[in-house]
Image (cartoon, helix red, strand yellow):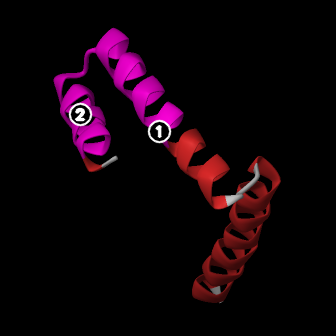
Amino acid sequence: MGEECTEVIIAGEKEDKEETVYEISDLAYHVLVLMVSAGITVEDVTRELEKRHVIDHKVKQERMQ
């Protein structure tokens, strides 16, 4: 998985959309395999992202006060 992450970073730095999409697709595949292996659902990830958004939103509001 680390190799896939590195390849995404390298492709992104090249600003080559086609290569970046290709590498992101590889990474997404490996993430999905890991999720299945660990019993993690898309809903689990969605809930976590929603929690982070709420926390991030609260932190931004506190900083503005």
Label 1 amino acid? His
Residue at the image point whose x is 71% and y is 67% from the top: 48
Drawn side of residue 20 relative to residue 14, left or right: right
Mark in the foreground, 1 or 2 = 1
Image disc number at residue 7: 2
Q: Kindly indicate the quadrant of the structure image that contains residue 38.
A: bottom right
Mark 2 surroundings within 10 Å by alpha-carbon count, few (fewer than 14), some (14 through 19), many (20 or more): some
Toward the viewer: 25 or 21? 25
> Mark 1 to mark 2: distance in Å?
13 Å
Per the image, label 1 sits on a secondary structure element best described as: helix
Label 2 amino acid? Glu
Q: Earlier in the sequence, mark 1 or mark 2?
A: 2
Residue 59 vertical position relative to residue 19 in the rendered view, above or below: below
The residue labelled by disc 1 is 30
Per the image, label 2 sits on a secondary structure element best described as: helix
Report the residue that reaches farthest toward the front. Answer: 37
* Range covered by the magenta-colored residues: 3-30
Instruction: Say if mark 1 contacts mark 2, CB within 8 Å.
Output: no
Residue at the image point whose x is 65% and y is 89% from the top: 65
Mark 1 surroundings within 10 Å by alpha-carbon count, few (fewer than 14), some (14 through 19), many (20 or more): some
Q: Quick check: is 56 in the magenta stretch?
A: no
Residue at the image point whose x is 23% and y is 26% from the top: 11
Drawn side of residue 1 relative to residue 3, left or right: right
Residue 32 placement (x, y as % from top left): 59, 41
Q: State whether the magenta stretch is mostly helix, strand or loop.
A: helix
Residue 32 vertical position relative to residue 49 in the rendered view, above or below: above
Toward the viewer: 42 or 58? 42
Residue 8 placement (x, y as % from top left): 30, 34
Q: Quick check: is 25 in the magenta stretch?
A: yes
